[in-house]
Amino acid sequence: METVILIMQIGLALLFVYFGSLKVFLPFEKIKSKVSWAEDYPVSRLRLFGFIEIIGGLGLILPHQLNIFPILTPMAATGLAMVMAGAAMVHLKRDEFANIFLNIFIIFLLAGIGFNTLLEVFHTTEI
């Protein structure tokens, strides 16, 4: 089970860091050509979304694997699940229903990672 969780952590961390980096570093016109909802937000908010995704993606893997404040991993998973819930609302507003199912699937994966790593943190913490 630990291997499955680790694979999910790595996969989602790479996903969020990659797409967050695109939002932070690509010019606004290229972002608009890749995603339809980008025109609804100012550039500064897109950069903020990207920064949050990068930090969250790093938080999915680094604290738990390096054993430095491992409680940050379930917190990052929860934060990214909230970001994905917001993304699902944007897609719902724009009638992009196929994207909503992907958002919900990612939320479930994040919930599994968060719950499992939270149990590990509490199980290994000495009282």
Image (tube, rainbow, N blue to C red):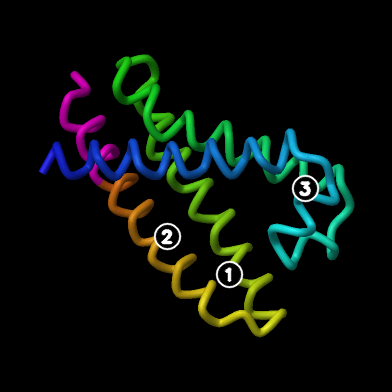
Query: Are circles 2 and 3 on residues that touch, CB within 8 Å?
Result: no
**Which is nearer the N-term, disc 2 or disc 3?**
3
Q: CA distance from mark 1 to mark 2?
A: 10 Å
Say which residue appears at 24% left-offset and 36% top-offset.
Answer: 6
Q: Tell me the residue that label 2 is attached to.
A: 107
Image depth: mark 2 or mark 3 in front: 3
Distance CA(mark 1)–CA(mark 3): 16 Å
**Is residue 83 toward the left or the right of residue 33 in the image?**
left
- Could you tell which of marks 1 and 3 lies nearer the N-terminus? 3
Quadrant that contains the N terminus: top left
- Judged by its main secondary structure, the magenta piece is helix
Question: Residue 33: x and y, percent?
Answer: 76, 59
Q: Is residue 104 above or below residue 84?
A: below
Check disc 2 and give the amino acid type: Ile
**Do tag 1 and tag 2 residues touch (Cβ < 8 Å)?**
yes
Residue 10, horizontal then vertical, whole percent: 34, 36
Point out residue 26 in the picture as x, y percentages from the top left corner.
75, 39
Please give left or right for residue 101 compared with residue 97 in the image. Answer: left
Q: Which residue is mark 1?
A: 88
SS for tag 1? helix
What is the number of the mark on residue 46?
3
